[in-house]
Image (spheres, helix red, strand yellow):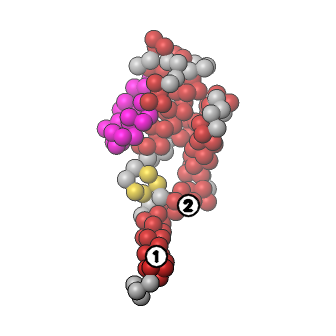
């Protein structure tokens, strides 16, 4: 089977693909992140999980396209902070922080404090990445 490089490549590619499939479908989480299967299930479910997942997707769409998050309804963003996942809650607070920078700056210290509370549950690399994003926000002197 391994006498031909092409056969070896095809076999090796199949094995890697199979294990990626298993890693993204069998568990519901890998570390702090939901797997693809779990995110799909959340979208197909009814109720809170679906609403949170849709809010995350919408907020991510704004963030990736570099549109101001203030264009999104703050109530939708606040759904994210009710998730069971510390990573989603922290990301939700980041989106809320991005939104209130332009509207209700008095909430900045409260939101930053809640983000700090979640940091113990998250990987330091995630926190460092988020702090770089937060540093880009015009928080001014009221930041916590």
In the visual, does 33 lie left or right of 99? left
| Mark 1 residue crowding within 10 angstroms, few (<14) / some (14–19) / many (20+) | few
- In the structure shown, which secondary structural element does the residue marked by tag 2 occupy? helix
In the visual, does 38 lie left or right of 128? right
What predominant SS class does the magenta segment belong to? helix
Residue that appears at 42% across and 30% down: 131
Is any atom of residue 11 visible in this view?
Answer: no
Span highlighted in magenta in the image: 110-131
Residue that appears at 40% across and 86% down: 3
Residue closer to the observer: 116 or 7: 7
In the visual, does 9 lie left or right of 75? left
In the visual, does 29 lie left or right of 68? left
In the rendered image, the residue lying farthest to the front is: 4
Mark 2 and mark 1 in contact? Answer it, CB < 8 Å. Answer: no
Residue 133 vs 124, above or below: the answer is above
Residue closer to the observer: 108 or 60: 60
- Tell me the number on the disc at residue 41: 2
Residue closer to the observer: 47 or 9: 9
Q: Split into 4 quadrants, where in the image is the N terminus?
A: bottom left
In the rendered image, the residue lying farthest to the left is: 120
Q: Is residue 113 magenta?
A: yes
- In the structure shown, which secondary structural element does the residue marked by tag 1 occupy? helix
Q: Is residue 2 magenta?
A: no
- Tell me the number on the disc at residue 27: none
């Amino acid at each position: 089977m391994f006498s031909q490089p092409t056969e070896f490549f095809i076999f090796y590619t199949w094995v890697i693909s199979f294990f990626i499939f298993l890693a993204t479908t069998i568990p519901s989480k890998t570390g702090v992140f939901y797997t693809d299967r779990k995110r799909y299930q959340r979208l197909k479910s009814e109720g809170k999980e679906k609403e949170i997942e849709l809010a995350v997707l919408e907020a991510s769409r704004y963030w990736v396209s570099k549109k101001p998050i203030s264009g999104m309804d703050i109530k939708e963003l606040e759904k994210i902070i009710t998730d069971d996942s510390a990573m989603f809650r922290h990301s939700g607070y980041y989106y809320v922080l991005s939104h209130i920078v332009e509207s209700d700056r008095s909430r900045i210290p409260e939101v930053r404090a809640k983000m700090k509370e979640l940091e113990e549950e998250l990987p330091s690399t995630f926190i460092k990445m988020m702090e770089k994003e937060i540093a880009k926000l015009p928080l001014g002197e009221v930041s916590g």
